[in-house]
Image: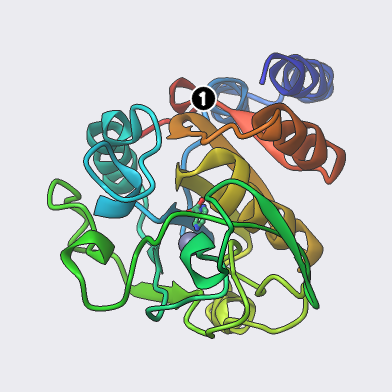
Amino acid sequence: MKTYDRREFVRIAAASVVVAGMGARATAAFAQAAGKIKPSATDVLLVVDVQNCFVPGGTLPVKEGDAIIPLVNRIARGFQHVVLTQDWHPPGHGSFASTYPGKRPFETISLSSGTQVLWPDHCVQGTPDAELHKDLRITHAELIIRKGYRKFMDSYSAFYEADGKTPTGLVGYLRERGLTQVFLVGLATDYCVGWSAMDARKAGFTAFVIEDATRGIDTDGSLAKAWTDMLGAGVRRIQSSDLDV
Ligand code: VGL
Ligand code: ZN
């Protein structure tokens, strides 16, 4: 976040020299740009998996997962366009340890789509555990995208399933609606948020992860790895205080 801020500041400072003397209006515009990011009509907030399963008391609880909800609600009020995602697995899903005799949650297996972490049964379609969290207040959200509903393919990402090519339809939706910059919040930083941010880049969108509005699972160093991968893919790491919302 710091790196991006500094770079952006230098760019804007250099540009300000060029516009010096252009008058008060130009100066004011740059003063605003030098400050916070104001979400525009071509930006979309992607609220990833803020569901009962991923908060304390759920089946795959993320530490402090519920702590982000008031912040997510506040950020969402600053965005005209919001898309929600919902992890939505059939019973006996291929990502559940219980599907494989002798396997325990957090062990891994090899599937045709690659290495699969095995999870406790979670977010089973139609159960209260899979519902969006009751404290989420984003009534103006325009789309809920469900993922992970194919029995033997997981989908952390909101864009492509775990094989990296089966689309959820979200790329087409965003393109058709002229939405070009994706801001991500939600759960979990190192899985569904991270994979979604990487895939947003892969599909050609600008991607910002609002770090303080996410929380991670962090199995075996997965959180640090996710940030390395995201930053390497050009994902921008920002804080909610960087936004004018
Ligand atoms: C997620 C693990 C399994 C997530 C979903 O939302 O990050 N993690 N399914
Ligand atoms: Zn899942």
Q: Kindly indicate the quadrant of the structure image that contains residue 51.
A: bottom left
Foreground of the two, 16 or 35: 35
Q: Relative to residue 67, is residue 79 depicted above or below?
A: below
Q: Position of residue 17 (x, y in %)?
A: 82, 16
Look at 65% across and 74% down and name the residue there. Answer: 161
In the rendered structure, the answer to whether residue 35 lies left or right of residue 144 reads: right
Q: Quadrant of the N terminus?
A: top right
Q: Relative to residue 70, is residue 90 depicted above or below?
A: below
Q: Position of residue 232 (x, y in %)?
A: 86, 39
Whether residue 161 appears in this view of the structure is yes
In the rendered structure, the answer to whether residue 223 lies left or right of residue 37 reads: right
Seen from this angle, which residue lies furthest left?
Answer: 134
Q: Position of residue 6 (x, y in %)?
A: 75, 14
Alpha-carbon neighbours of circle 1 within 10 Å: few (<14), some, or many (≥20)? some
Q: Relative to residue 215, is residue 58 depicted above or below?
A: below
Q: Quadrant of the C terminus?
A: top left
Whether residue 205 appears in this view of the structure is no
Q: Relative to residue 96, is residue 173 depicted above or below?
A: below
Q: Position of residue 191 (x, y in %)?
A: 60, 48
Q: Mark 1 near ligand 1 (CB under 8 Å)?
A: no
Q: Which residue is mark 1?
A: 239
Foreground of the two, 188 or 107: 107
Which amino acid type corresponds to the residue marked 1 in the rendered image?
Gln
Look at 29% across and 65% down and name the residue there. Answer: 141
Q: Kindly indicate the quadrant of the structure image that contains residue 89.
A: bottom left
Look at 68% across and 35% down and name the residue there. Answer: 222
Seen from this angle, which residue lies furthest front?
Answer: 102
Foreground of the two, 1 or 13: 1
Question: For the residue labelled by badge 1, is the local secondary structure a helix, a strand or a loop?
Answer: loop
